[in-house]
Image: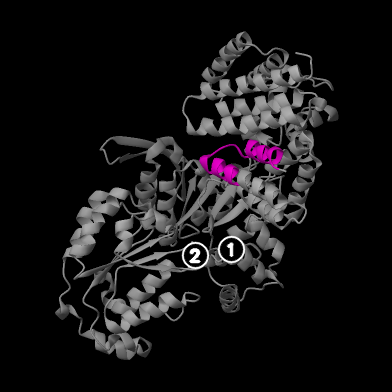
């Protein structure tokens, strides 16, 4: 059984519902004999990957969909063997250098250069160059990025690089100046809604307008999430009703509960209780930055408006500060707990000031 | 060499060295896209001509393995071998007749030294750089080094003091504009009014960036006129309207409004660094703020930039900036 997300993923550029102008531009780009390096960026679930795959198809034809997975080996300077899995077709290859952690520079210097130095094998190919797609390019280390600089220029005749990233902040300027930047904005509510209706039509389902709108709003601009939620709701209850509950992930509920509980009581005992829940979240592989972000936004949402600028402001500042430290440190629970404790202090102080505490 | 624009001092000095057959070690530094690599390659070509450039010039950049062992082995070996003056190919004279514009440098034999170009030297490890120190001195009879980097502070002091330093300035507006117009004319690009100026302004003196932008725009809009909006979109510039909405939320002072504005901006996928840049410009130009307020905001902006580079979440950072400052 295939998830609807994959089943209804558009395969061609002109089948994309979202951002038609961008699709048209990409089509002209693909029709051109020449092709620049690309840096595709945008929030998750906006369709970056779908666009890249569709673009590849536009360039090389359907042959690009015959994929195989290779495991490439390379050795680090300290002579340990490392492996990375690479998805390849005859014309392109796709990898996530972040998989090998600190050794990602070697991927660039060894693997990509090796690919760059060999020419297109298939003489019938429509283009003389191959394309390397690098996923999660914002996770590339600085070393790897500066190694990429010259590779991109030197092997222009045989290689194009497509970088796929959520934000351009961590891509160094020299790389940005070598790429054509392609921004993929997240779809708006009406667009998500129309996609939901389309999927339902294809699946032969009836969906009330109201419910579709609510799903689209809950998806937060993430199309993948929207379709996954739709499928989850379908399993939960069908036919859909207007006021059907929208399926929320467990972790979201848990975090919302944490927010409620620390607003209602600020004490060491409560902190201890929250610690248990936080640990549980982490052990279920919910990334700590996602936890802290949702928690902060939920807190701000739940504080009454007349709580004023003061508390909310400190919450947001603290969230940003601890989230930053989270990236630098490596023990997530410390920072999560510090954030909770900070919130408790600030909020308690505020309540006492108001004469309520 | 004559084609290098906007870097008069550098070119003047290098031209002198072409005449005098002597060259110091060089250290080129400056922002990206100002022609550092192009200049040294042009110099090498003029010095050696196309025939022997292969054997006289070694170019290493960050994409090559450049640990300490490479410096010890590869660079040292290359530096060691002396140039025999008799190795001058006899075809040189004839080639100089074939290409009269090259004649100046072939009055004499090619200079009796080789050049090692270390591109992107600031990404070399400190160890590798220290290994270079002695090598540079010992083999200075036969070899000249040229280090190229963006940040001179990342090249260790002992190396920097061995070299003649040249700073490459960002290209002057007029030079960049002239060059872009030349390219447009050569390639038959149909540019709208003001487009070239926008290109130059956006690239901030980075010539490669403006040419890349121009080329991308040309490819995306085959044959059609390229307008300012097209350029802004592919350069990743945040439209004024979006910045306006952020500023409006900011001045309103309400957290929920700020939250909504930030969420919508992040969802549209604009890069936070770019937003930061443009916000900063707007704030500096704002006449209603006192210097102290501006200074405070600048501090927050700097902090946020650092956090972003460390990989912090864009949405939270933007929120923090907007609730802190003002």
Q: Is residue B322 magenta?
A: yes
Residue A121 seen anywhere in this rendered image of the structure? no
Q: Chain of mark 2?
A: B
Q: Residue A214 sits in which quadrant?
A: top right
Q: Residue at x 76, y 31 (%)?
A: A309
Instruction: From the viewer's perspective, tell me whether residue B228 is left or right of residue A210.
Output: left
Can you say which quadrant of the picture contains the N terminus of chain A? top right
Q: Residues within 10 Å of mark 2 (few under 14, many from 20)?
A: many
In the rendered image, which residue does mark 2 sit on?
A: B33
Residue found at x 49% / y 65%: B33
Residue B123 visible from this viewpoint = yes
Q: Which residue is mark 1?
A: B203
- Distance Cα–Cα, label 1 vs label 2: 9 Å
Q: How is the image coloured?
A: one colour
Q: Which residues are magenta?
A: B302-325
Q: Position of residue A340 (x, y in %)?
A: 62, 20
**Is the residue under label 2 in contact with that under label 1 (CB below 8 Å)?**
yes
Give SS at disc 1.
helix
Please name the residue shown 60% across and 79% down the image: B185
């Amino acid at each position: 059984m295939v998830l609807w997300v994959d089943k209804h993923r558009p395969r061609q550029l002109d089948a994309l519902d979202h951002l038609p102008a961008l699709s048209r531009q990409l089509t002209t780009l693909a029709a051109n004999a020449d092709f620049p390096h690309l840096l595709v960026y945008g929030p998750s679930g906006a369709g970056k990957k779908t666009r890249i795959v569709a673009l590849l198809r536009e360039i090389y034809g359907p042959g690009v969909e015959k994929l195989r997975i290779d495991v490439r080996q390379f050795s680090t300077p300290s002579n340990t063997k490392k492996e990375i899995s690479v998805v390849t077709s005859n014309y392109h290859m796709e990898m996530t250098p972040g998989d090998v952690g600190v050794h990602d520079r070697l991927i660039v210097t060894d693997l990509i250069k090796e690919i760059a130095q060999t020419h297109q094998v298939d003489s019938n190919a429509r283009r003389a160059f191959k394309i390397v797609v690098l996923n999660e390019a914002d996770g590339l280390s600085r070393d790897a990025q500066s190694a990429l600089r010259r590779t991109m220029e030197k092997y222009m005749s045989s290689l194009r690089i497509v970088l796929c990233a959520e934000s351009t902040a961590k891509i160094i300027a020299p790389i940005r100046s070598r790429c054509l930047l392609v921004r993929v904005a997240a779809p708006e509510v009406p667009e998500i809604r129309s996609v939901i209706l389309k999927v339902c039509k294809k699946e032969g389902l009836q969906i009330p307008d109201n419910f579709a709108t609510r799903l689209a709003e809950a998806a937060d601009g993430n199309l993948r999430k929207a379709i996954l939620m739709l499928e989850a709701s379908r399993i939960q209850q069908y036919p859909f009703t207007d006021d059907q509950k929208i399926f929320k992930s467990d972790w979201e509920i848990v975090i919302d509960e944490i927010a409620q509980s620390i607003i209602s009581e600020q004490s060491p005992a409560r902190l201890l209780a929250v610690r248990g829940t936080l640990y549980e979240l982490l052990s279920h592989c919910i990334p700590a930055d996602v936890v802290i972000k949702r928690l902060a936004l939920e807190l701000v949402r739940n504080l009454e408006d007349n709580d004023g600028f003061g508390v909310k402001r400190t919450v947001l500042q603290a969230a940003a500060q601890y989230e930053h430290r989270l990236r630098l440190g490596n023990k997530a629970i410390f920072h999560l707990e510090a954030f909770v404790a900070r919130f408790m202090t600030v909020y308690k102080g505020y309540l006492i000031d108001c004469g309520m505490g | 060499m004559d084609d290098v624009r906007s870097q008069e001092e550098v070119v003047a000095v290098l031209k002198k060295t072409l005449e005098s057959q002597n060259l110091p070690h060089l250290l080129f530094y400056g922002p990206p896209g100002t022609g550092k690599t192009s200049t040294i390659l042009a110099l090498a070509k003029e010095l050696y001509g196309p025939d022997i450039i292969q054997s006289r010039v070694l170019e290493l950049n960050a994409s090559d393995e450049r640990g300490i062992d490479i410096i010890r082995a590869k660079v040292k070996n290359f530096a060691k071998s002396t140039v025999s003056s008799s190795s001058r190919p006899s075809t040189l004279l004839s080639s100089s007749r074939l290409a009269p514009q090259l004649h100046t440098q072939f009055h004499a034999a090619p200079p009796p030294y080789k050049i090692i170009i270390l591109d992107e030297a600031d990404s070399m490890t400190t160890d590798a750089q220290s290994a270079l120190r002695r090598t540079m001195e010992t083999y200075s009879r036969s070899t000249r080094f040229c280090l190229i980097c963006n940040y001179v502070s990342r090249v260790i002091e002992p190396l920097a003091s061995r070299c003649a330093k040249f700073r490459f300035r960002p290209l002057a507006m007029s030079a960049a504009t002239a060059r872009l117009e030349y390219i447009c004319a050569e390639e038959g690009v149909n540019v709208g009014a003001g487009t070239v100026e926008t290109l130059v302004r956006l690239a901030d003196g980075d010539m490669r960036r403006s040419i890349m932008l121009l080329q991308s725009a040309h490819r995306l809009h085959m044959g059609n006129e390229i307008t300012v909006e097209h350029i802004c979109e592919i350069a990743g510039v945040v439209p004024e309207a979006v910045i306006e909405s952020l500023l409006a939320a900011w001045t309103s002072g309400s957290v929920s409004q700020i939250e909504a504005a930030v969420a919508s901006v992040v969802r549209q996928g604009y890069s936070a660094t770019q937003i930061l840049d443009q916000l900063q410009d707007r704030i500096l130009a704002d006449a209603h703020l006192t210097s102290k307020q501006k200074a405070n905001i600048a501090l927050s902006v700097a902090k946020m930039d650092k956090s972003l580079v460390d990989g912090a979440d864009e949405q939270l950072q933007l929120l923090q900036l907007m609730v802190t400052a003002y």
